[in-house]
Amino acid sequence: MAAILGGGIGGLSTGYYLLKNNLCSNNNLKLLLLEATNTCGGWIKSIKTKDYIFEQGPRTIRPKGLVGLNTLNMIQDLGLSEHVHPIKFDHPAAKNRMIYANNSLHLLPSSLKGIFQKNEPFSRPLIYALFNDLWNPYKQLKDDSIYNFVERRFGKEIADYAISPMICGICAGDAKEISVKFLMKIPFEWEQTHGGVMKGLMRSMFKTKNDNNIELSELARRAQEEKWNVYTIKGGLDNFPASLLQHLMENNVDVQLNSKVDEIKFVDSSTVKLKKKTGEEIMANHVYASIPSHVLADLVVKQHPELSQNLKDIPFVTVGLVNFYFDSDKPLISPAFGFLVPPIENSPILGVVFDSCCIPDQKGTVLTVMLGGKWFKEKFGENVTEKELFNIALREVATILNIQEQPTAHNVKILNKCIPQYIIGHYEKVEQIRQYIHDHNLPISLVGSSYDGVGINDVIYSAKTQVQCCI
């Protein structure tokens, strides 16, 4: 029997790929999924009414690259294709992305023409950043922060007003701590190999491109042909994990909710004992752990303290989310994806997503304010209340967007330790963790956002690769 710990998108995807491989190999593998809470889906949660949808976590998915196409293949296989709502490259939510700096909203360039023009808060056209890369020397490094890399190659303004807020939007983190390999692995390799990003880019243009070895579904081909920027699922993004859960249960996966595991004991190379909070013990041949690394650390600490410490060394941040619904006949915002706030502005918020522009079937104006992240405790202390976060978010929305109306409905959620931070040395740390597991012949695989990428696509692909490793 294979046991899956965690019913988030990582655990559900692990079950999906185990079923897929089980079907192909004609094995009769018994699968058990243990979820500590009373619901599956992890951080993907949607509050739904007839007038609006409040997304409590991710709200859109990118279709790009191998991992993006892989997710689209899964979505079609689950029968969700007709529920996909794409945002194409010419949609306002794709073209209009802003930052808030110097007490003003600024539209970021979205075309080639834009990089030749001066756009505030940048003091010069962005084309000058490319010259900066051509002229500047490079440092021989194994890793670096994404902030240092971008500042070195393209200048401080790009690091402060483009990359830093983008990191806030992706992982609620500090670009001065996040590894360059998190988002810019290939440009970093170009610098280290060729002395600069543009030099590496020019050389790469003369190399034969390797096509991704993946068979594309009709939905994935459509996304490429129509040039989707992002997409979501009609009726709420949590319909995606709900469909995965249904698929697992229809294929006889034993899904047990409210089943918290207190300890993992490795008996030998093919036997694992899972001790539940109730005292019940479950024996499995292999465990797929999709729970956060710091949670897993507590389960293995008695038997493997070194592994536990390495797992705990992966930091996480807490994010506050405040959803607003304004029942107004006239739109209170201009069509856009939303805006992010650079950390240099020292704001209590990370940014605001214009959900009524990004998510279909919304009435009135729907906004989501993101707060804290890396700076949550610094900004709000240890015991901030949901009411306090609501007031802060409402004040910032009124100040920045000039919305003076009171929201018709709202929801506040504090997502405690929700996003792992891929700080400098993260990938070496993960390699060290997996090497320890290999050296000690432990029947466990690590899946999910703690290790191989924080996005939905990354987590799903992590499940696929870890299942394939055990075949």
Image: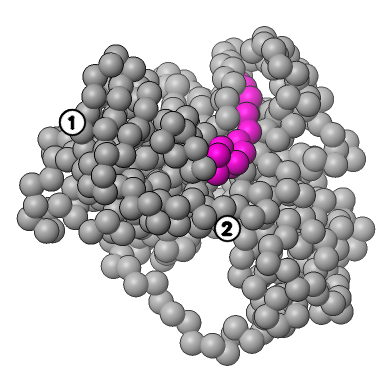
Q: Is residue 453 visible?
A: yes
Q: Quadrant of residue 238?
A: top left
* Label 1 or label 2, whichever comes before in sequence order: 1
Task: Please say if 49 is above or below 102.
Answer: above
Q: Nearer the viewer, residue 140 or 437?
A: 437
The image shows residue 140 at horizontal and vertical percentages of 75, 73
Asked if residue 318 lies in the magenta stretch, the reply is yes
Residue plotted at (38% across, 56% down): 438
Of the residues shown, which amino acid type is indicated by label 2? Answer: Glu
Task: Please say if 191 is above or below 370.
Answer: below
Residue plotted at (23% across, 41% down): 271
Mark 2, residue position: 428
Task: Please say if 225 is above or below 179.
Answer: below
The range drawn in magenta is: 309-324
Mark 1, residue position: 254
Position of 366 with respect to 346 (left or right) is left
Q: Is residue 358 visible?
A: no
**Which of the numbered marks, if any, corresponds to residue 236?**
none
